[in-house]
Image (cartoon, rainbow, N blue to C red):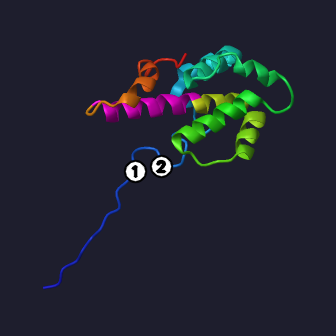
Amino acid sequence: MSRQLVQVQPESRGQQEGQWSTGLCECHKDVGDCCFALCCLPVFTCKVTRAVGACACLPLLDCIGCVPPASLAMRASVRQRYGIQGSVWSDCLYGCCCYPLSWLQISRELKRRAASHASSSSSSPSSSSARYSALFSLQGAHLV
């Protein structure tokens, strides 16, 4: 009698390590923020920047020069915080060519990571969960 070993690779249901949890053009995954950004992008960017923990007025610098410094800084900060692959060049490209989409992706990433962190730490609370509590309380609503 011969034995066969069948191995099935598990499917990943969460975001892959080192990747954004949503694509750049996946605005349909958060229609509320998309509508808000469409109506008033400057206020939306200030609210997202405040949620990251930076000065809320930082995005106002984006109107100076050809490279938006706040968009570049926020994307780089979120990438570093969550170990997302990329470079300053890709951040610059997205900030210059896909400005609103880049801010919406940052917003979705913050909300999803905060929600996943809160759900994983609900069984074993940690001291680092305090910094995510403000974002988690807004899950299902606008980030702002």
Residue 108, relative to residue 39: is it above or below?
below
Whether pointer 1 and pointer 2 mark residues with C-beta atoms closer than 8 Å, the reply is yes
Measured in 3D between alpha carbons, the distance from the residue under mark 1 to the one under mark 2, in whole angstroms, is: 7 Å
What residue is disc 1 on? 12
Toward which corner of the image does residue 71 lie, by quadrant?
top right
Q: Residue at x 52, y 20 (%)?
A: 143
Q: Amino acid at mark 1?
A: Ser
Q: Is residue 101 magenta?
A: no
Residue 71, relative to residue 33: is it above or below?
below
Q: Position of residue 109 (x, y in %)?
A: 53, 33
Dot 2 crowding, Cα within 10 Å, few <14, some 14–19, many 20+: few
Toward which corner of the image does residue 34 lie, by quadrant?
top right
What residue is disc 2 on? 16
Q: Residue at x 56, y 45 (%)?
A: 84
Q: Residue at x 33, y 36 (%)?
A: 120
Q: Residue at x 76, y 41 (%)?
A: 93
Residue 43 visible in the picture: yes
Magenta stretch in the rendered image? 107-122
Q: Secondary structure at mark 1?
A: loop
Toward which corner of the image does residue 39 lie, by quadrant?
top right
Dot 1 crowding, Cα within 10 Å, few <14, some 14–19, many 20+: few
Q: Quadrant of the C terminus?
A: top right
Our reading of the magenta stretch's main secondary structure is: helix
- Along the viewing direction, whichever of 55 and 97 lies nearer the viewer: 55
Residue 45, relative to residue 102: is it above or below?
above
Q: Amino acid at mark 2?
A: Gln
Residue 23 visible in the picture: no
